[in-house]
Amino acid sequence: MLNTKTAHELLDLIKAGKASRDKILSDLKSRIDKVEPKVKAYAHLPKETDSAKQDSLLNGIPIAIKDNICTKGQFATCASRILENFSAPYDATVIKKLKEKGALIFGKTNMDEFAFGSSCETSCYGPTRNPWDLERVPGGSSGGSAAAVAADEAIWALGSDTGGSIRQPAALCAVVGLKPTYGRVSRYGLIAFASSLDQIGPITKDVHDAALLLNVISGHDEKDSTCADIPTVDYTSCFTKDLKGVKIAIPKEYFIKGLDKEVEDSVKQAKAVLEKLGATFKEVSLPHTKYAVSVYYIIATAEASSNLARFDGVQYGFRDKSSGSDESGQLISMYKQTRGKGFGLEAKRRIILGTYVLSSGYYDAYYLRALKVRTLIKNDFDKVFKDFDCVLTPTSPTAAFKVGERLENPLSMYLSDIYTISANLAGIPAISIPCGFTKNKLPIGLQLLSAPFKEENLFRSAYAFEQNTPWHKMKPDLNI
Amino acid sequence: MKFETVIGLEVHVHLKTKTKAFCGCSTEFGSEPNTQTCPVCLGLPGSLPVLNAKALEYAVKVALALDCKPQEFIKFDRKNYFYPDLPKNYQISQYDMPVGLDGFVSIDIDNVEKKIRVKRVHLEEDAGKLIHKQEGSASLVDYNRCGIALLEIVSEPDINSPSEAFEYLKNLKLIIQYLGVSDCDMEKGSLRCDANISLRPKGKKQLGTKIELKNMNSFKGVRDALEYEVKRQEDVLSQGGSITQETRLWDEDKQLTFSMRSKEEAHDYRYFPDPDLVPFTLSREFIAGIRKELPEFPKDRIPRYIREFGLTQKEADIIVQDKDMCVFFEGCAAVYTQPRKIYNWLTGVVLAYMNDRKKNITQLDLKPQALAKLIQYVEEGRLSNLAAKDVLFYALDEKKDIDSVIKEKGATQVSGSKDLEKFVEAALKDNPKSVKDFLAGKENAIMFLVGQVMKLSKGKANPKVVKEIIIGRLSEDTTYGIK
Amino acid sequence: MNISKDTVKYVANLARLGLNDEELEKFSLQLNDILQYIEQLKEVDISKIAPTAHVLDIKNVKRKDEPSASLPVKEALNNSPQKEGSFFKVPKVIE
């Protein structure tokens, strides 16, 4: 079945005349028909009408897109009721680039509402399930993209990552997820969660596809002031068989209480594989790691509270029409009812927290302080990357948890991002790749981080590791 | 009890850029609703702002012209509040690192210069326009204006009377118009002004409770509203009452202010640096470059015009009100050395034409050299004032050059042509008594004859020339018996 | 640090967020947990540290003052819950 292949495999097959676009699509569709009712990876299923440029780099290979990225004429709802029926009148820059290279936009994947979450449970469309264990979450917020790729309901996908939203679900679903350097990929058309942390990135079946996809979506964009005007490289050309001369740091702060024993063992075994390939390791300290979650939840919610202010029922999306006039008047009542009913619980919680930390009298104590500690976290990494090519850590402290397990305890949910958040705060690139399974057959991911705009370092180590391990070839058994 | 008035003004001006502050939509005034919008200015999900370089340049220009200290580092912040004319429910503005800080505008109070300090100048985006329907329970929103680059200029409370406020606004507007960065047209909303006003017992340091005044549609409206408010507050305070802090709106028709009466919350704008926009550094070279481009402002131009061109203070005051007029005036003065004559022509005939055709001087098809030539013709007696005016109006209407109009209309004529001679003959023939009187030595009699010729020529003749012709005619022709 | 229900109410009003009593109660408890956790930042010496509002050292990104296409008005209004002519329509702003 062609839907199980990677994009680069399909491109080779098409070139060799052994696969057709129609066959790829029909294989995908029949797979979706079978497993989607169980997995629920899509927020909006692919439309028949979509078409792609022929004879191009990507040759019509379909790609699933997270529902917070705008594709012209299609829904972009961020899995939120407040954006119900919102159809984007324009293409995000990444979509424009993908279309130019001949990709076929193929469905919008489910996510935590507005990317607020690590479990894909807060979607207004209901939770996505982990293809490896349908009782468990796929991770989040790009859980739909990760689950779709893992369940072979998509060839590859785009996600977005604000605090780990690509990497954590990639780890929990045994796929590859890359968060590029902040500024490597244009954010234009990505419905913002936290503007200073958000990045769009690939979720793929192997490292090669991630590099190929980054080749297409990265680079300068005049529509995004924060998108760097720094040349990209061909990321598929940096793969090597061994890792001679590669220096990898292991931060001691990441191997502490709360890290699941099985995950720890699996990452240590991965270290042994990399060592065998020629990489050298040294333990380092990233002393401000323990503050990352605090800093993150102040900055991310503050920015989100402002970014989400626009969802008010005036121009688009849901408007509560029942709202009459309360003591503050018709308009304010419309605002409050619309937002009160349109946003889910987690979104409301974050809007409240973010509004609070910015409100008069608290700015210095929270927001400004968080920005300063952010500097310290960034400095920690700058220092390490003077001497090392990569940093190796687990992606998530645990494997996939059960649906509903952490919903009522926001703090415990927030803490599941503990290993991924720092990369967003420091703006550095990070990749998660499969590195093993628990005894319950739940995927485990390892994370590699590198200096800003050095994605090639990640690809090199990740590729060599992948070539020497079986994990990325494993497929979930969905009892079909 | 005597009170002192304390006023601070907040002026917003639209910068005259082709496109909006953070997107490429047109800024043209008066288009159909919501036709000049895009994902960015509509604040659609996923869109991002990118600063218009021209808007920044214009903003820096104004800051420097107001003597603000050059800022090396500026950034944009989000001002968060909900209002339907604000699609993102935050306004991109500047909080603690604006384009300009600590400047001033000079005003003239009874021939004494007073400096009104300018606290800050910052760049922001304008909001859309709300139309409140009279009937029904709805308001309509047009986002065409939304996102247009707006400069906010905030004065210190240094203004002590409504007329000082009026002078401040006049001078501020003039400076901005000199820079050519805004139309400053209150009717089109490209200049708006809100005022803060409070009264305090004379000699007291502590400021009184301030009232925010809005909805003034002209400088005169600002002055009237402030005057009304001074009186109102004086009355309240003299009767032992107190002022409640509130926003009041000026009612132009009824000539009074009234409380907005809506429940006002304490503002909590939650400013923070806009993560979508990067900071800006203004290099010394950039600042120096802009400084070099600054024009000579009225406060320097007036004394120079008095000195160089011999204008009176009043004349200089008048002409500097229009920078383009000044440019034209100086262009003319460079080729024709009678500046006062030029001034009279410009503020007389030319201005009359401009007012009549509702055009400014740059919109006229007139070069300084051409006007200079015309004035010269008049001075040489080739054209009468009236004829010259006709020539000019005709030339401007038809977009023709002056010499060809003169030829075409035969306007030079009147000082040499047969027509004129005919008029002279007729005048002499019809007024034998005056001829006699003149020949008898009554010098004044000739003026009557000149007058008659002027009448016959319908004012086109040049009186000086007519006089010479009459004298010549009477001396050469023995019929009239001159020796 | 303690967020009372009243504080949550005040903040919810700033954010134009209609919350019911149950939500107010729940949020004030949960936010207290989170804020308590965040308190740890107070132990960091930040006296000589500059804030990082932008993680990249990018400055002076501008565009030329050149017009680009606006949306067709139909598309601009396409998603509107309520419109009148080519205006967006909202409940009366001033009553």
Image (cartoon, coloured by chain):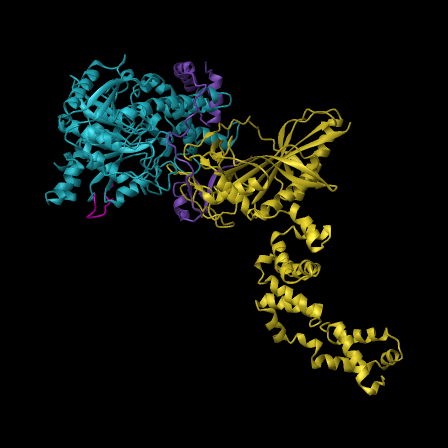
Dividing the picture into quarters, in which one does residue B104 lie?
A: top right
Lateral position of residue C48 relative to residue B378, left or right: left
In the foreground, A399 or A87? A399
Examine the rendering and report whether any part of residue A154 can be seen: no
Q: Quadrant of the N terminus of chain B?
A: top right
In the foreground, B137 or A175? A175
In the foreground, A11 or A169? A11
**At which x and y percent is residue B205?**
70, 25
Magenta part mainly helix, strand or loop? loop
Highlighted range, magenta: A47-57
B245 relative to B224, above or below:
above
Chain in cyan, by letter, is A
Dividing the picture into quarters, in which one does residue A410 lie?
A: top left
Lateral position of residue A294 relative to residue B359, left or right: left
Residue A108 shown in magenta: no
Examine the rendering and report whether any part of residue A222 can be seen: yes
Lateral position of residue A188 relative to residue B109, left or right: left
Q: Count all numbered tags in the image, as a single digit.
A: 0
Chain in purple, by letter, is C
Lateral position of residue B263 relative to residue A219, left or right: right
**At which x and y percent is residue A471?**
15, 25
**At which x and y percent is residue A85?**
34, 37
A385 relative to B13, above or below:
above
Chain in yellow, by letter, is B
**At which x and y percent is residue B457?**
73, 75
In the foreground, A117 or A180? A180
Taking the spot 42% from the left edge, 16% from the top edge, the residue there is C45
**Which residue sits furthest top?**
A257
Q: Quadrant of the C terminus of chain B?
A: bottom right
